[in-house]
Image: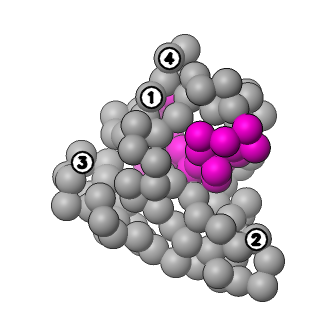
Amino acid sequence: MAALLALALTGNDAAADKYSRSKSPYWKVGAFDAELTYACRSNLFNQFKVDSLNIGYSGDKGKGMTGIATKAWNLRDLQGLARDGITYHFFNDGYSNCEVYTAKYR
């Protein structure tokens, strides 16, 4: 997954069709962010292309998919909430139950 994430962070479009899988629940991808989740549900903080790069979760609990974005790649941030060195993981982006999780990558 690190190689895929590195491709995404450099803006390489070759990563667009690639993904990773995990048996962990999707909510373990990072820290839940209530402010960004609210912004996502309000269409103020979203991916430009939903699930362009993603992680699929196929374990016994927490099945689903999270799309990935960074401040410099695949992110629509109308309020300037994004920070450098953070990956944003979106569960159900585009829906009223969107959730955003953050993880450091530097």
For the residue marked with disc 1, what is the amino acid?
Arg
For the residue marked with disc 3, what is the amino acid? Answer: Thr
- Measure how far apart labels 2 and 4 are at the Cα level: 29 Å
Q: Which is more N-terminal, label 4 or label 2? A: 2
Question: Residue, x 30% and y 65% (percent of image)?
Answer: 17
Q: Which residue is mark 2?
A: 62
Q: What x and y, as percent, mark residue 23?
A: 65, 82
Q: Residue furthest front?
A: 95
Say which of marks 3 and 2 sits in front. 2
**Quadrant in which residue 94 is drawn:** top right
- Cα–Cα span, label 3 and label 1: 17 Å
Judge from the rendering whether residue 19 lies leftward or rightward of residue 59; answer left or right. Answer: left
- Report the side of 55 relative to 42 (left or right): left
Q: Give above or below for 27 relative to 78.
A: below
Answer left or right for 80 relative to 28: left
Residue type, numbered disc 4? Leu
Nearer to us of marks 3 and 4 is 4
What is the number of the mark on residue 10? 3
Q: Helix, strand, or loop for circle 2?
A: loop
As shown in the figure, which amino acid type bears the numbered disc 2?
Gly
Q: Quadrant of the N terminus?
A: bottom left
Task: Kindly identify the residue that appears in the image at 19 percent across and 61 percent down.
Answer: 14
x%, y% of residue 42? 67, 24
Marker disc for residue 50: none
* Element under disc 3: loop
Residue under pointer 1: 76
Residue 93 sits inside the magenta stretch: yes
Q: Residue at x 40, y 58 (%)?
A: 53
The answer to whether marks 4 and 1 mark residues whose Cβ atoms lie closer than 8 Å is yes
